[in-house]
Image (cartoon, rainbow, N blue to C red):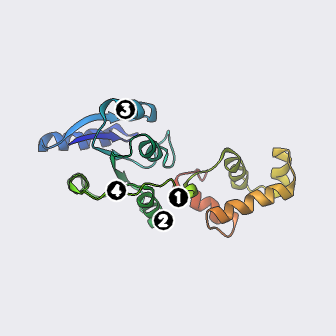
Amino acid sequence: MKILLYDDHPFVTEAITSYINVLGEMQVVGMCHTVEDFKVKLANTKPDIVISDVLSDEDAGFTVFYYILEHFPKIKIVAYTSISSSFIIHSLLDLGVHEVVNKRENIATLIDKVKQVYESSTSKNYKVVDLLTLTPREKQIVDFLKLGLVAKEIAVELGTSPHTINNQKNALLEKFGCTNSTELIVKLSQMGLVGLV
């Protein structure tokens, strides 16, 4: 079984690799700490399973998973994350991730889950979930909402009308199932799509 690791903290990938090397049942074909390095190694090594963090300093959100699903749909994905939000876990599983393991679990538990995923003949139905992405314009509006600006102020900043901003904001609230701007910002932060500060 060939495994590719992605985490922006090298000590995480090194700890997993050390554990796997002791077992001798699997082969780590790469430890990646940047998205660009990950994409190169993914293409060059064609692993059976990717163990990946969900959020990193460089890449917030599910970009890495989208990339795998689009370009290498046969590779199985195990998310190894400190996120405990049930909303995000369900979103990952809906997206096509095979297993989500919390980093509070020990590495032995992670490897047991990896083995189960590898041995499972169940294939996931991959789907790109629109709710997990922000367009560049939506990101601009959310950034202004985080600053506490109202539609009229955002309209001045973006050179458009308050009516247009209100429509775009209402579309965002509907898209993410929120009732107000504060709830929207918190949910987007939990998803890793924006920072709170």
The residue indicated by pointer 1 is 190
Of pointers 1 and 3, the one earlier in the residue sequence = 3
Circle 2 or circle 4, nearest the eye: 4
Cα separation, mark 2 vs mark 4, equals: 16 Å
Q: In 3D space, how far apart are the residues under numbered discs 1 and 3 (Cα atoms)?
A: 30 Å
Reading the chain from its start, which is encountered first: label 2 or label 3?
A: 3
Q: Which mark is first along the chain, 3 or 4?
A: 3
Check whether the beta carbons of the residues at disc 2 and disc 1 lie within 8 A of each other.
yes
The image position of residue 128, as x and y in percent, is 50, 53
- Give how far apart the Cα atoms at labels 2 and 1 are: 9 Å
- Identified by mark 1, the residue type is Gln
Instruction: Using residue 151 as the reference point, say whether residue 39 is left or right of it.
Output: left
Q: Does residue 33 show up?
A: yes
Q: Is residue 158 above or below residue 88?
A: above
Q: Which amino acid type corresponds to the residue marked 3 in the rendered image?
A: Ala
The residue identified by callout 4 is 98
The answer to which of marks 1 and 4 sits earlier in the sequence is 4
Q: Quadrant of residue 187?
A: bottom right
> Residue 195, percent across and down?
58, 50
The residue labelled by disc 2 is: 87
